[in-house]
Image (cartoon, rainbow, N blue to C red):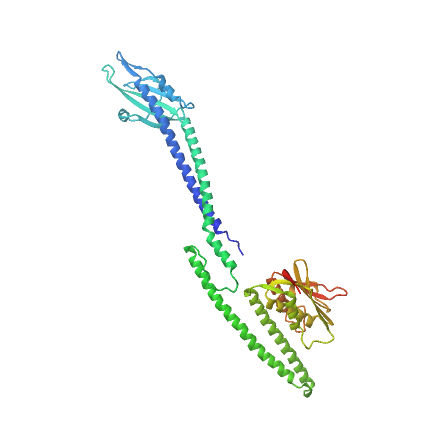
Amino acid sequence: MRRETSLFARLALRISLVLGIGAGLLVTAAWYYARAAADDAYDRLLLGAALQMADGLTVEGGQLIVNLPTSAFELLGLAGRDRVFYRITDPSGRTLTGYGDLEANIDPTTVRREPVLESGRYKGEAVRIAVVSRALADSSAPGWAHVVVAQTTEARRTLAGELTLRASVLVAVMSLLALAGAMLAIRYALKPIERLGAALRRRDPQDQQPVTVEVPRELGPFIASINHFMGRFNERAVLLRHFVSDAAHQIRTPLTALSAQLDLLDGDRLDETARQHLYRVQVRAKELARLTNQLLSHAMVIHRTETAQLQPVDLVDVARRAFRAAIPITVDPDIVISFEAPDEHPIVSADAISLREAIVNVIDNALRHGTTSRLDVRVCIDDGSARVEVEDDGPGIPPQEWGRITRRFETSKSSGGSTGLGFAIASEVVAAFGGGLSFREKQPGAGFTVVLTLQRTIEKNV
């Protein structure tokens, strides 16, 4: 049977995926916001430096004089890792100071209205460029002077990376906390399913009433299906009980009558051939009656082990009643039959009727197929278990056959009317009660022994 993943694992996996995707989106958004914040902060410094340089332009004697303020370079120096380039031009476009090849692809008309910022490359490096215009009202030098200031972007990238890292750590911590909270919420949400399972496990096997456990609305269809199934199962169980009861009555009655009619036939009036046929019919009728009884017993045992409630029973009392039921009145008087029990009666948890049927089948099997001159039935106790031992002085069963003969319709006898059901019934019954059926190999001075072992509960003295 293929092992399915649990509902908790499925929900945890899907929530983890959702949180992982959400965390990835948040980190991506944080990177964009961090880069925008870094650009905005350093653009303000760059623009402030360019405006201070523009304020340092004066006209004296018809000449445009450049007075570069120290504060402008101090402002740009806040980004210690970056390099700064600048160029100041007069209205005619002539470079007054700075780098003559520093260009900005900006429409002069736009710059005259407001300062302009753009990204570009200079000397093979990515730079951020600020362009500021200054109107000269002096009649000797009319026009617009331009200040172009460029700064590399290393400090911006560093700041953006630090901001992104801090945001990523925060997102990771929040995601882990959210995942832990989700796991706790899933566990709590699945509690009704666990309560439902526990309630079903605690139900008595004979309790076919509808399940009335309080569950969330989503589990309503599941509960309805369980109740519908239990109703159908109860109907089938009732029909099965009626069938077994009717079959036991309808089949056993004619078989008993048939056996009685065969016994009434006077074999002395028949010839040798007819007597042989009569004998074969009598043997087959007895085998059919025994097989029918064992099949019905097996059906009854299976039904009771699945439905009957286990109760403390006195193993000695059950074994003694089984002994009396299994030993026929017409048993060979030359066979020595004994029953031994300890003074301390062991108590086991079982169904008395099914356990008695199991012991009856083992004794009957020993009496029919094993016993030569002796049959011993004993009840023994150990520290935590109790045993019913059935020992006969027959040839026993080879050890290589032990694993096979506890299966239905498997027998070690090739003839002799063995049905292969006795050990199967006994094995299934004791297994249902938490015990086991085993064999003890025939030893010199001892016989072959079948052992039924059960766990003890409490004891009583007699």
> Can residue 148 be seen in the rendering of this structure?
no
- Residue drawn 45% across and 35% down? 169
Residue 379, x across and y down, in percent: 68, 65
Q: With 302 as the anchor, is 417 left or right in this view?
A: right
Residue 39, x across and y down, in percent: 37, 29
In this rendered view, identify the residue nearer to me: 433 or 421. Answer: 433
For the view shown, which residue lies furthest in the top direction?
A: 61
Rendered view: 241 above or below 114: below
Residue 308, x across and y down, in percent: 55, 65
For the view shown, which residue lies furthest in the bottom direction?
A: 269
In this rendered view, identify the residue nearer to me: 297 or 387. Answer: 387
Quadrant (top left/top right/bottom left/bottom right) for the C terminus? bottom right
For the view shown, which residue lies furthest in the right direction?
A: 445
Instruction: Give residue 128's quadrant in the image.
Output: top left
For the view shown, which residue lies furthest in the front direction?
A: 462
Q: How many marks do you count on the picture?
A: 0
Residue 58, x across and y down, in percent: 28, 15
Q: With 59 as the anchor, is 30 left or right in this view?
A: right
In this rendered view, identify the residue nearer to me: 368 or 193. Answer: 193
Rendered view: 246 above or below 162: below
Instruction: Give residue 124's quadrant in the image.
Output: top left
> Can residue 232 be seen in the rendering of this structure?
yes
- Residue drawn 44% across and 36% down? 170
Instruction: Give residue 334's quadrant in the image.
Output: bottom right
In this rendered view, identify the residue nearer to me: 314 or 289. Answer: 314
Q: With 184 as the anchor, is 116 left or right in this view?
A: left
- Residue drawn 62% across and 83% down? 261
Rendered view: 230 above or below 253: above
Quadrant (top left/top right/bottom left/bottom right) for the N terminus? bottom right
